[in-house]
């Protein structure tokens, strides 16, 4: 059993993917070919933003977004602690200070009440300059942008939506990657929409920001390639990856996101009475980048994971260590009392196989072993 079955997806889309790759090979335009522009147009249309610029990977997408705001030393950016490292890493790379925010214990996303508390603490207790917020759509579920956007406006902070896992999710029909001043996503193969290597994209409705991103992603170019007006990156999406993503985006829209909903709902039906399943508030739609359960404690979680492994079922812990606990941030000593929920989640979460090419029998089998494991654990 595969945790994410990319091979099955390729079997289904093989003819279209191979045909697109062959077209690129025959044309020989491997950098910024016409497929890149077509993909950017299709992505912007799907997400509902005016502009989209692709780039080399999801981390670069965040870096490019941050570069638009001239983030520097003594600035601070508010980020969730319960997420992948790159969200905070790009803040530190720009010389700024990440301020870590705790999670809502049921949605896993940034706790907006603790966000506002931390902003006021920084303003009252430090010399740091609050500059912006990076909110992550964790496990496929968009963050609470109604509240987070209001807070950003109240304190005059820019808002970046890190939609690396959220692509395909929505709030009341408004798509993930359309909520921030700038939004980013990743096309890492395991993401809801993934390529066959690295890739990323940035979305915005602001033409000035869009033009900055176009410059920054190609060495800070000006009017042409050899006119460099700012320091930038070399971060372009390969044409072959764009060619691969075009049929995958169509499949994603046509049926893959629906299949993810179907299998998540079946997991819920099977497991709701035994363990905490993902909580999706009314009006929200998750793309289920991961389907993640919450167990009572670390021992129970580890027992279930080992039981699944013994029966040939893969599972993953996202994330075993919050960002404020990472070795590189060992000296972080701000608002630690307000980071207890994410510490607890790290000990209790477990993600199950989730992809659009599952089947009902597999979901019921996985669920059955979890229920069985919990019964065994009670009697250990």
Image (cartoon, rainbow, N blue to C red):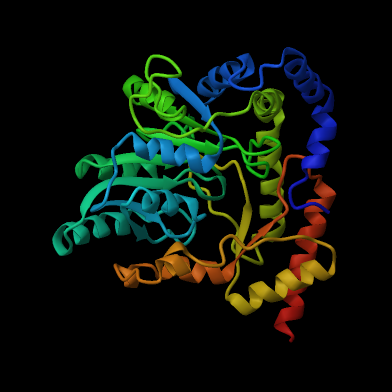
Left or right: residue 68 compared with residue 319: left
Left or right: residue 156 compared with residue 365: left
Q: Residue furthest bottom?
A: 380
Q: In the figure, 223 relative to 229: above or below? A: above
Left or right: residue 41 compared with residue 253: left
Name the foreground residue: 49 vs 216: 216
Q: Residue at x 38, y 67 (%)?
A: 339
Q: Position of residue 234 (x, y in %)?
A: 50, 32
Q: In the figure, 347 relative to 88: above or below? A: below
Q: Residue furthest left?
A: 124
Name the foreground residue: 186 vs 103: 186
Q: Residue furthest front?
A: 226
Left or right: residue 283 compared with residue 257: left
Q: Residue at x 76, y 60 (%)?
A: 314
Q: Position of residue 81 (x, y in %)?
A: 43, 60
Q: Position of residue 287 (x, y in %)?
A: 59, 41
Q: Residue at x 25, y 42 (%)?
A: 157
Q: Position of residue 180 (x, y in %)?
A: 38, 35
Q: Quadrant of the N terminus?
A: bottom right
Name the foreground residue: 127 vs 132: 127
How many numbered circles are shown?
A: 0
Work out whether residue 179 can be spotted.
no
Q: Residue 333 falls in which quadrant of the image? A: bottom left
Name the foreground residue: 165 vs 333: 333
Q: Residue at x 77, y 25 (%)?
A: 17
């Amino acid at each position: 059993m595969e945790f994410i079955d990319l091979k099955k997806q390729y079997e289904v889309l093989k003819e279209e993917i191979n045909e697109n790759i062959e077209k690129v090979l025959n044309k020989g335009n491997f950098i910024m070919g016409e497929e890149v522009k077509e993909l950017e147009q299709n992505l912007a249309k799907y997400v509902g933003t005016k502009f989209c610029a692709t780039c080399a990977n999801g981390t670069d997408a965040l870096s490019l977004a941050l570069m638009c705001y001239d983030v520097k030393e003594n600035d601070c950016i508010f980020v969730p602690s319960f997420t992948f490292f790159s969200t905070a890493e790009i803040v530190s790379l720009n010389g700024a200070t990440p301020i870590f925010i705790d999670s809502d214990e049921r949605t896993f996303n940034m706790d907006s009440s603790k966000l506002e508390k931390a902003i006021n603490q920084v303003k009252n207790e430090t010399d740091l300059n609050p500059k912006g917020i990076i909110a992550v759509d964790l496990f496929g579920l968009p963050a609470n942008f109604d509240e987070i956007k209001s807070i950003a406006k109240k304190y005059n902070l820019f808002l970046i939506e890190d939609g690396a896992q959220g692509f395909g999710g929505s709030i009341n029909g408004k798509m993930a990657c359309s909520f921030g001043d700038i939004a980013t996503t990743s096309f890492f193969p395991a993401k809801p929409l993934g390529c066959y290597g690295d890739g990323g994209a940035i979305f915005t409705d602001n033409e000035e920001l869009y033009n900055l991103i176009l410059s920054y992603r190609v060495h800070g170019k000006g009017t042409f390639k050899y006119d460099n007006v700012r320091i930038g990156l070399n971060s372009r999406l390969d044409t072959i990856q764009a060619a691969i993503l075009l049929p995958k985006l169509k499949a994603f829209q046509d049926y893959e996101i629906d299949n993810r909903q179907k299998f998540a709902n079946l997991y819920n039906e099977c497991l709701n009475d035994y363990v905490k399943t993902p909580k999706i508030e009314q009006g929200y739609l998750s793309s289920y980048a991961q389907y993640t359960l919450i167990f009572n404690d670390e021992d129970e979680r580890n027992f279930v994971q080992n039981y699944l492994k013994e029966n040939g079922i893969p599972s993953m812990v996202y994330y075993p260590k919050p960002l404020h606990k990472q070795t590189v941030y060992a000296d972080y000593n701000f608002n630690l009392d307000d980071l207890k929920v994410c510490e607890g989640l790290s000990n209790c979460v477990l993600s199950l196989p989730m992809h659009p090419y599952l089947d009902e029998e597999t979901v019921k089998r996985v669920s059955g072993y979890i229920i069985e494991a919990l019964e065994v654990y009670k009697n250990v």
